[in-house]
Amino acid sequence: MVFLLPLGVEGATLERRPWVSLSITAVCVVAFFITWVIPANPVGVNEAEVRALIQETLVHRQLELPPACGALLSDHGKALLARMKEQSPTSLRNVNVEVLQAKLDAHCDGVLKVRDSGLLQRLGLVPARGLKQWGWLTYMFLHLGWMHLLGNLLFFYVVGLLLEDVWGRPLFAGFYGVGGLVAAVAHFALAPTSQTLMVGASGAVAACMGAFCLRFATRKVRVGYLVWFLHFWRGTFGVPGWLWASLWFGNEVLNFLLWGNNTGVAVMAHIGGFVFGFGAAGALRLTRLEERFVAPAIAERDGGWVADPRMVEAQTSLESGDRDKARATFLRILADHPDHTEALLWLGRMELEDGQVPSGSARVEKALQLLVAHDVPEPLWNAVDQLGELFPVERLRPGVAWRVAQGLDQGEAPANATAMAESLYAAAGKGTGIMAVRALIRAAELRLARRDAPEQAAGYLTRAKALATGDAAALAERVEQLEVEAVRMGARMKNRGMDLDTESATARTRAVAALAPVAVGGTLLPPRIVPCRILGLSSKALLVEAQGGQRRSLSITEVLAVAVGMLPVAVPEGAAPRQTVLTDLVVSWGDPERGPTVLRIPAAGLGLAERHPGVAPREAYARFLAALLEHSAANPMPDAPTLAEGRYPRFATEGQFTAHYYGQVAAAA
């Protein structure tokens, strides 16, 4: 005994939710419960009633079961009844055959009336009813038993989801409905006077299989097998879509040729549906309607991306080494859709590999501009991966480089995208005006955040300083702050104190000493303390509000250091002493004329209860501090291990806290 069942399509992924397929499945399941599970006698006629009719027919050889009730019997049942009638009595005393026949006819009419009153019978398709019946549309959502339902839905799952994904919901919904209707017409044409009820989604599913046979001919269907012959063998194997669907269709044709439409299964509906589906997919391919109209419509509605079947063909050609065929296919795609980003990127990469730098760079630049316009970072990250070292950074116009860099510099970007963003900002810095200065500042921030090669950040800042004139003069202060940070980072790296978590205590001491405020003539300048509270914190930015109500949004990398300390809280006499945490964010170390600028945030200004609801205050603060240090790459004070262990320094007064970290009490803010 051998069982074969399709389990799915290898490597199948969906770009959209298959709402039409899910809706069809839901309707089939709901209709099954209403018409089959809930009713006590869903088909309206039980076996006992049929047996009673047969016994009544066998009373006399001249009695005939009415043709309408004959439809309740299978061909085998009809043949058996004919043999049994030969043994029926030919004559009975005091029996009126006409009266018996009338009684049999009335019994038959009563049985049929009960049968026809059932919901399943009313909504199913009965060819003898003619054209005016709801069954033409409703039969494809009804089923006779659990195996009938589950079998049809399994095959529909294998073929329907992918078709809906590439054809879109409206086209697939129409195709499914028309496919089911064509299957019903094929069944009707074979036996238009049949009283047999036809229900089931298999006709429409057969149409989907016919389309799948052509549209996904090379995709492999994973088939599970179970073999039982004195032992069980089970496993799976892959079959090309065209072969799997063709074998199923061939089996249906063979069944029809051998047994006609008398197997209890409407095989002609299967054949008609499959032929329609194959023909519909062939028509779409010959007319190129999918490529020219269907795919662009889906792309416009779903955000600019859709799978073009020719892309698979081109990429397959490229993998097999046929670059000329791949190039020709990409060019055909671009002839129909000039803004097809995937084709632009692939063809641009090929041209860059072949030394056609100007044309390749132009295609890549156009693709990048289109991707930036979608305002979704993932496609840009993928473009960075795809182009690799071929990415033509230096050939991009400064304005384009700026926009692409901003597109890459968002969300939780991978490391290669962040590195490319820095290079693009540097390329944008070759322009002029405020955009160039902003780009160079951001390039320096990204470089400093990596704690690698601060001299390169210094180079960016030197270029930015020369451009910080006119409208860009307001950015000069930020350039100076970053220059100080670059110098200090360089000094720390020379002292091998950059990694405060792993270096020795001596190295940590030297590193922290390098953070000391600027001294003038041996005297430390007092810090400028700005009391604040945090309104928003992300991996990229920090929003703070000063006591006077002024708000400021600053890049997270502007936080150069984080200082933490514990201070006593005034409590009533006799109450247990309590401590509160004070957090300083150093945003400038000052210069020979000014001391450091520090944003001082009390515990109440951190918003820990809102950010970490239900978490104990000490644990919530530890999480906040870890996130702040991670995103800002700021220097922890006193040092990273101490803060990570929650051993925050204690001070008697706020003045002691300030003097400990900055050498002077605070200046008036």
Image: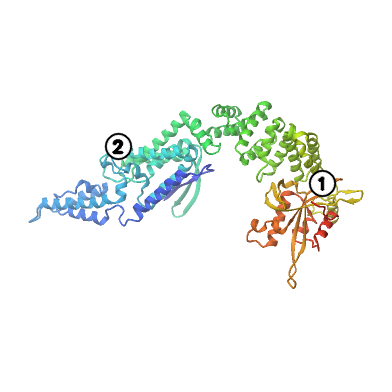
What residue is rendered at 61% in x and 39% in y? Answer: 375
Location of residue 648 by image quarter: bottom right
On residue 489, the disc is: 1
Q: Is residue 308 visible?
A: yes
Farthest residue in the bottom direction?
574
Which residue type does callout 2 highlight?
Ala
Judge from the rendering whether residue 182 lies leftward or rightward of residue 536; answer left or right.
Answer: left
Query: Which residue is more in the foreground, 653 or 243?
Result: 653
Query: Which residue is more in the foreground, 89 or 650?
Result: 650
On residue 237, the disc is: none
- The nearer-to-camera label among 1 and 2 is 1
The picture places residue 231, in percent across and down from the top left corner, at 46, 55
The picture places residue 571, in percent across and down from the top left corner, at 74, 68
Describe the element under mark 1 as helix, strand or loop.
Answer: helix
Judge from the rendering whether residue 405 lies leftward or rightward of residue 641; answer left or right.
Answer: left
Q: Earlier in the sequence, mark 1 or mark 2?
A: 2
Q: CA distance from mark 1 to mark 2?
A: 85 Å
The picture places residue 656, in percent across and down from the top left corner, at 83, 60
Location of residue 613 by image quarter: bottom right
The residue where tag 2 is placed is 189
